[in-house]
Image (cartoon, helix red, strand yellow):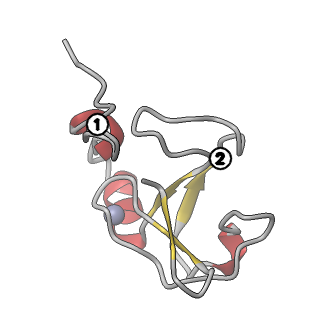
Amino acid sequence: MNTVTTAAGRVRAVCEFCGRQSRPVVPVDGRVWLLDLPRGWSEAPYSPTFTHDDGSTGSLWQCPACVRRLHRGEGLTSRAYAAPAALPGGEASPRP
Ligand SMILES: [Zn+2]
């Protein structure tokens, strides 16, 4: 998942690489707003209606640590593609 909604109705961005979560921010139009995140977080913009392989929708997020690794030239693999997780409800997508 690329975001987690808290019980208080706030939203945490989830790093697409390591799964680290940001502090909760007040969603704008139901989504995380990049400028509300702490310095260093980065966004891979997607349409809010775009659905990823893991069932999450909208933009992908990268935590400051992973952004630094990317800038150093490391090739990081998105969790969505590295380890497709079974979706709640049993709709696991089979992989070749
Ligand atoms: Zn990360």
Whether residue 73 is visible, yes or no, is yes
- Asked whether residue 78 is in view, the answer is no
Residue 1 pos. (x, y %) = 42, 53
Q: Residue at x 28, y 45 (%)?
A: 76
- Left or right of residue 56: residue 19: left
At numbered mark 1, what does the secondary structure look like: helix, strand or loop? loop
Q: Residues within 10 Å of mark 1 (few under 14, many from 20)?
A: few
For residue 53, the mark is: none
Above or below: residue 58 compared with residue 33: above
Identify the residue shown where x is 46% and y is 40%: 55
Q: Tell me the kind of residue under disc 2.
A: Pro
Q: Please, is residue 46 above or below residue 9 in the view?
A: above
Q: Position of residue 11 (x, y in %)?
A: 58, 74
Question: Between residues 41 and 22, which one lies in front from this camera angle?
Answer: 22
Residue 40 position within the rendered picture, expressed as x and y whole percent measured from the top left: 51, 74
Q: Earlier in the sequence, mark 2 or mark 1?
A: 2
Q: For ligand 1, which image quadrant applies?
A: bottom left
Tell me the residue that label 2 is attached to: 45
Residue ID at (58%, 44%): 57
The answer to which image quadrant residue 46 occupies is top right
Residue 9 sits in quarter: bottom right
| Amino acid, disc 1 | Gly
Which residue position holds label 1? 90
Secondary element under disc 2, as helix, strand or loop, is loop
